[in-house]
Image (cartoon, rainbow, N blue to C red):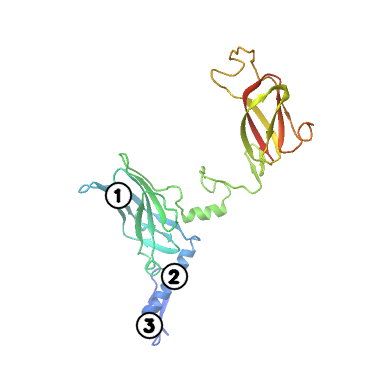
Amino acid sequence: MSYNRKTPLLGIPVPKAERLRSDVEYRKFCLIENQLVAGTGGVRYAVFSDGNYQVEIDADDEKCFVRLVGTGRTPSAHGIASGAYFRADDALVWSGLKRGKKYFLYLRSNSKTMFDFSDIRTVSSPFELEDKTALLMAFVDLRDEPYSLDPYPDGKVYSSDVALHTNDRKNPHGRQLFQDEVFIGKRLVLEDGATFEIGQIANVSDFKSGGRKGVELAGEGKEILHVDVQELVVGDGPSWISKKPNGRCAVGDIAIGYYGMDGRVTDPDRVMVYNKGDSGLLLRAMILYG
């Protein structure tokens, strides 16, 4: 069997035989090569490297465009988009951007990218794409001059970051992390040694003092482990500053009655809050559940 072609990146030889169509075999081997190259990145969406971004204004229609160009011998960008390896040796351009708006800049692959790694399409959106069908490259703000471009927006993934994330325990997401929700399996330990066991949930509750008779607080079916109580400032100041015609002047000392210790507390999800001073004063409790 003879070979008359090879793939462009790894040089995989493509066989030629009487019963084999060379163009069909070439497509097959390009597909294999593409998957091999993409697999070295370890993810379906990642930037291996990108060049320099330039924001330019089209003087004719007052619109803007962003140009991404390579540096030296490096391509404008290469990486993985939707599982397909791409490499753009020529400049990439996001055009038709309107002044006064902001845009997220993406690259999107297609079925042809698997066989031609240079076939990649630029996509711009005023909103961050939630369907994860494109590779985030940059963010440009055209609302105020001078226009700004961020080549490292939140959500952009470099293959080097993925490797660092798996091998480095310290700051794998950088020195600052902005996350809408964080789920921790067992415990949260602070640098000073303070530990919070998972399952301990805090809640804030506002209520009026009951004086020496006390006020019962319920924990919504959850065991109450600890309660802190403070008086809230209402109007011109706290109760011990404000003059009241009926003589009420302060909350006084506060005591907490817990289940198993205070005979008036009959359930673990309840506590009693007593104060030596007056009733009817606004208090706030921080409740820690087990």
Quadrant holding the N terminus: bottom left
Which quadrant of the structure image shows residue 268? top right
Q: Nearer the viewer, mark 1 or mark 3?
A: 1
Residue 70 lies left or right of residue 287; in this view the side is left
Q: Are marks 2 and 3 in contact (CB under 8 Å)?
A: no
Residue type pointed to by label 1: Leu
Q: Secondary structure at mark 1?
A: strand
Q: CA distance from mark 2 to mark 3?
A: 18 Å
Residue that extends furthest to the left in the rendered view of this protein: 60
Q: Secondary structure at mark 3?
A: loop
Quadrant holding the C terminus: top right
Residue type pointed to by label 2: Glu
Q: Position of residue 273 (x, y in %)?
A: 70, 28
Residue 104 lies left or right of residue 227; in this view the side is left
- Disc 3 packing (10 Å; few <14; some 14–19; many ≥20): few
Q: In this figure, which residue is indicated by the disc labeled 3?
A: 21
Q: Position of residue 52 (x, y in %)?
A: 35, 51
Q: Nearer the viewer, mark 1 or mark 2?
A: 1
* 110 lies above or below 178: below
Q: Earlier in the sequence, mark 2 or mark 3?
A: 3
Q: Which mark is residue 97?
A: 1
Q: Earlier in the sequence, mark 1 or mark 2?
A: 2
Q: In this figure, which residue is indicated by the disc labeled 2?
A: 33
